[in-house]
Image (cartoon, rainbow, N blue to C red):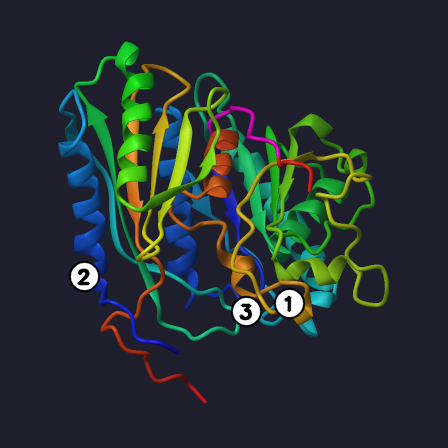
């Protein structure tokens, strides 16, 4: 079992990826919190993997972007990702505006999505890989 | 409204993780555009605490099916106004519980979702007393649960509902952590990665809960 960054570092980096991406794009989006999880369990009762790892994630609505700007905004984000070591894993456009990418260096993932029901809105999320809360493997039960 | 039925190993001491999964599914439905959604974690049954030998037994599912049926009926009875769009979603052995309930009791819901299923107690979707176009299933390419669907003594719960013969709507999920090439890449980790934040499987679960069609699994 390897060391990882800490849970706090994971939370901070997820937050930073979102803010850096949004700061690099036009129009400037106003962030509205969707979710903020610092400790989503990264194990399943039966996966027999080391227990105790967690995932940190952040999700935001991107406000103040008019629907007719959404398509160009997502294109620009995908370009930003390619310039910042992210590889697109899944792109469901044009049928479903959902694009999911992973950072080649640290395993963080981000996704952008447009609502399909009701008013058109964009949301952006970032998540860490599985990390040990304190960065080092926890003692396992015998 | 969605009811999440967790699988093997679920109990009150581990329910925090399952409640977090419900939180994540709620967010996925919200980001798809659903404006009024609740996701309930249903642990109203004695879940088998191990894959072997407990989960190979059908008694657990049969013990739960009436309670799950009653729970879905109660959701309808207590809802006022236009009927809500109700989804019943299971993981692993939770899918077997849902399958037994639909097969033997009928389920008062709009969508059934089977995530990483060892089998749901029938050989074809049309045996679930439910419109087959509203029965959805997924399994990750590297998910170890697929070994329970190899014909033979361990295939006790019926075929994989993502199989082409079963007749369900198969939706996309990420391949998951790739295991050893000696095991053809399957891994235990992949059995629980469906709720990794914003991944394709979770996006699809949110779409189904919101009443939208999921993205189909590309042919492998």
Q: Which mark is residue A9?
A: 2
- Between B106 and B143, the residue placed more toward the observer is B143
Secondary structure beneath dot 3 equals loop
Q: Quadrant of residue B111?
A: top right
Q: Main SS of the magenta segment?
A: loop
- Between A33 and A80, the residue placed more toward the observer is A80
Q: Chain of mark 3?
A: A
Q: Are marks 3 and 2 in contact (CB under 8 Å)?
A: no
In this view, the residue farthest toward the bottom is A142
The span from disc 1 to disc 2 (Cα, nearest Å) is 33 Å
The span from disc 3 to disc 2 (Cα, nearest Å) is 28 Å
Q: Are marks 1 and 2 on the same chain?
A: no
Q: Is residue B219 left or right of residue A112?
A: right
In this view, the residue farthest toward the front is A83
Question: Of the residues tagged 3 and 2, which is closer to the observer?
Answer: 2
Secondary structure beneath dot 1 equals helix
Question: Of the residues tagged 1 and 2, which is closer to the observer?
Answer: 1
Q: Position of residue A135 (x, y in %)?
A: 25, 73
Q: Which residue is mark 1?
A: B181
Q: Which mark is residue A46?
A: 3
Q: Quadrant of residue B53?
A: bottom right
- Between B187 and B10, the residue placed more toward the observer is B187
Q: Is residue B91 visible?
A: yes
Q: Position of residue A123 (x, y in %)?
A: 29, 30
Q: Is residue A11 left or right of residue B9?
A: left
Question: Of the residues tagged 1 and 3, which is closer to the observer?
Answer: 1
């Amino acid at each position: 079992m390897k060391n990882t960054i800490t849970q706090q570092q994971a939370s901070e980096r997820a937050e930073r990826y979102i803010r850096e991406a949004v700061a690099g794009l036009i129009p400037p989006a106003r962030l509205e919190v969707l979710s903020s999880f610092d400790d989503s369990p990264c194990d399943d009762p039966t996966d027999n993997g080391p227990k105790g790892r967690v995932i940190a994630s952040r999700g935001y609505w991107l406000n103040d972007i008019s629907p007719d700007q959404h398509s160009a905004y997502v294109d620009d984000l995908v370009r930003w990702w390619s310039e910042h070591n992210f590889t697109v894993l899944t792109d469901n456009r044009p049928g479903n505006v959902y694009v999911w990418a992973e950072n080649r260096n640290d395993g963080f993932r981000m996704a952008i999505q447009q609502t399909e029901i009701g008013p058109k809105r964009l949301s952006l999320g970032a998540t860490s890989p599985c990390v040990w809360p304190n960065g080092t493997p926890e003692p396992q039960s015998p | 409204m969605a009811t999440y039925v967790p699988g093997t190993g679920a109990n009150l001491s581990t329910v925090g993780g399952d409640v977090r999964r419900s939180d994540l599914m709620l967010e996925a439905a919200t980001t798809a555009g659903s404006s009024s959604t609740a996701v309930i974690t249903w642990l109203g049954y004695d879940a088998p605490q191990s894959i072997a030998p407990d989960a190979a037994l059908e008694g657990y599912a049969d013990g739960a099916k009436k309670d799950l049926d009653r729970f879905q009926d109660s959701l309808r009875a207590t809802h006022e106004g236009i009927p809500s769009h109700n989804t019943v979603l299971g993981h692993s052995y939770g899918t077997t519980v849902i399958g037994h309930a639909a097969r033997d009791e009928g389920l008062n819901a709009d969508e059934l979702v089977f995530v990483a299923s060892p089998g749901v107690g029938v050989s074809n979707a049309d045996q679930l007393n439910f419109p087959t176009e509203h029965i959805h299933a997924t399994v990750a390419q590297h998910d170890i649960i697929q070994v329970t669907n190899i014909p033979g003594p361990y295939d006790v719960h019926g075929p994989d509902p993502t199989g082409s013969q079963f007749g369900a709507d198969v939706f996309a999920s990420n391949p998951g952590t790739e295991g050893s090439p000696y095991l053809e890449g399957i891994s235990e980790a992949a059995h629980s990665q469906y709720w990794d934040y914003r991944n394709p499987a979770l996006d699809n679960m949110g779409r189904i809960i919101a009443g939208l069609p999921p993205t189909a699994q590309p042919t492998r």
